[in-house]
Image (spheres, helix red, strand yellow):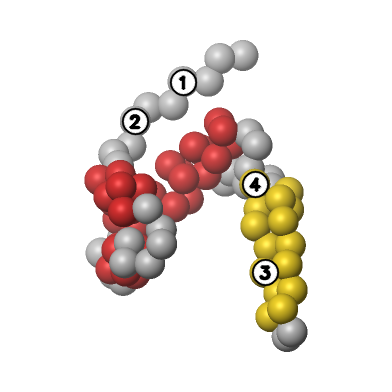
Amino acid sequence: MPTLTSQISYSLRNGAVHWEGREVENTTQFRNFMREIVKPRVADEDLPFADEIRGLATTKMETQFVSDLLSAVSSPCTISR
């Protein structure tokens, strides 16, 4: 199972609320994580994930990103050593 290593890009606090933004620098690692972990969950008919991710498109999350994510298809991964 691929892991996703990230680092904190920013961190803010306002009263009792705290949030942080994380950045994944390794694009190959990010693609593998999306393909092997996230994509099967999106495609799972028994989970409401697709509906929930579509709901994000009505927030400030980019609509095209959501559309691309939901229409993504698996492709073979070639690993060279």
Q: Nearer the viewer, mark 3 or mark 1?
A: 3
Under mark 2, the amino acid is Ser
Viewer-side residue, 79 vs 62:
62
Q: Which residue in the structure is indicated by mark 2?
A: 75
Check the image and report above or below for 26 versus 10: above
Left or right: residue 56 compared with residue 70: right
Under mark 3, the amino acid is Trp
Under mark 1, the amino acid is Thr
Q: Which residue in the structure is indicated by mark 4?
A: 23
Residue 76: quarter of image? top left
Tag 2's secondary structure? loop
Q: Which of the two labelled residues, at mark 2 and mark 4, occupies the earlier sequence position?
A: 4
Report x, y in % for residue 6: 69, 47
Q: Residues within 10 Å of mark 3 (few under 14, many from 20)?
A: few
Q: Which residue in the structure is indicated by mark 3?
A: 19
Q: Residues within 10 Å of mark 1 (few under 14, many from 20)?
A: few
Q: Which quarter of the rendering shows the C terminus?
A: top right
Distance from the alpha carbon under mark 2 to that under mark 4: 24 Å
Q: Which residue in the structure is indicated by mark 1?
A: 78
